[in-house]
């Protein structure tokens, strides 16, 4: 996942989920926030951020907010980046040899991010981006997610019908200790994740090498259920 036209800025405020006020080159700009999650621990006043300048003159906002520096840790918070990075990772052999990689695949009443064939078996994979971190420990989700729970239930059902199934947590930062379900925020999701793992859904987590201009999946992260 590579970005062009990246500029540095200083976060000022987030009036709503979709926009942020960022000081860029001495001017206060209204930026689109490409993440509708809470991100309260990331978007704090005076945080160093990086934004992508759009070449589209018809846009209401000139910039997209892409990443933020939390302490000495650079975190990508673009909710579209995990899928793009996952597609590159899968295509380059992240899960070994696969065929027929497709995005947005439907099974029963679920729509998963990817499907592919591995070892002759049709497989489904759902991607979840992770930005919530404290002292090197990551958690998902950062807000209750009925959609996330439904995805896990769909993957569980797919396994029971003989398909392969994966839940891939893309940790949008590097050098973390482990990932766990955020039971304090969404215990229903945590229960669904454990049930999925018990049923045979493969639960994976990978961290990323993040720069202001890029995000690439790198290393396996321990998942503690």
Image (tube, grey):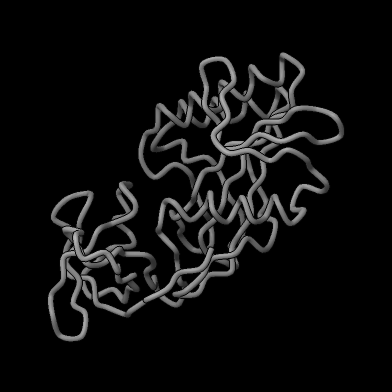
Left or right: 130, with 219 as reference point: left
Q: Give coordinates of residue 79: x percent, y percent.
A: 42, 51
Residue 147 against residue 66 in the figure, above or below: above
* Picture residue at 52% right of the left edge, 31% below the top: 190
Q: Give coordinates of residue 214: x percent, y percent.
A: 51, 70
Left or right: 129, with 6 as reference point: right
Can you tell which quarter of the image residue 115 is in? top right
* Picture residue at 40% right of the left edge, 57% below the top: 78
Q: Give coordinates of residue 141: x percent, y percent.
A: 44, 42
Can you tell which quarter of the image residue 119 is in? top right
Left or right: 106, with 134 as reference point: right
* Picture residue at 62% right of the left edge, 50% below the top: 87
Residue 87 against residue 74 in the figure, above or below: above
Residue 167 against residue 150 in the figure, above or below: below
Can you tell which quarter of the image residue 160 is in? top right
Q: Give coordinates of residue 157: x percent, y percent.
A: 64, 16
Pick out the residue farthest to the right: 119
């Amino acid at each position: 996942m590579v970005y062009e036209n990246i500029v540095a800025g200083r976060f000022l405020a987030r009036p709503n989920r979709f926009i942020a006020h960022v000081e860029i080159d001495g001017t206060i700009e209204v930026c689109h926030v490409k993440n509708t999650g809470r991100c309260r621990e990331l978007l704090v006043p005076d945080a160093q951020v990086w934004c992508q300048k759009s070449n589209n003159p018809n846009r209401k906002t000139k910039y997209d907010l892409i990443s933020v520096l939390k302490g000495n840790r650079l975190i990508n918070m673009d909710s579209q980046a995990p899928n793009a990075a996952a597609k590159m990772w899968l295509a380059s052999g992240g899960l070994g040899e696969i065929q027929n990689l497709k995005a947005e695949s439907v099974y029963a009443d679920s729509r998963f991010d990817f499907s592919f064939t591995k070892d002759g078996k049709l497989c489904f994979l759902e991607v979840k981006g992770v930005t919530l971190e404290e002292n090197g420990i990551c958690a998902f989700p950062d807000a209750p997610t009925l959609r996330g729970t439904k995805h896990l239930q769909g993957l569980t059902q797919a396994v029971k019908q003989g398909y392969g199934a994966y839940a891939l947590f893309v940790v949008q930062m590097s050098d973390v200790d482990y990932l766990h379900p955020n039971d304090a925020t969404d215990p229903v999701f945590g229960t669904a994740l454990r049930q999925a793992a018990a049923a045979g859904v493969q639960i994976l987590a990978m961290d990323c090498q993040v720069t202001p201009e890029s995000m690439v999946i790198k290393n396996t992260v321990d998942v503690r259920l």
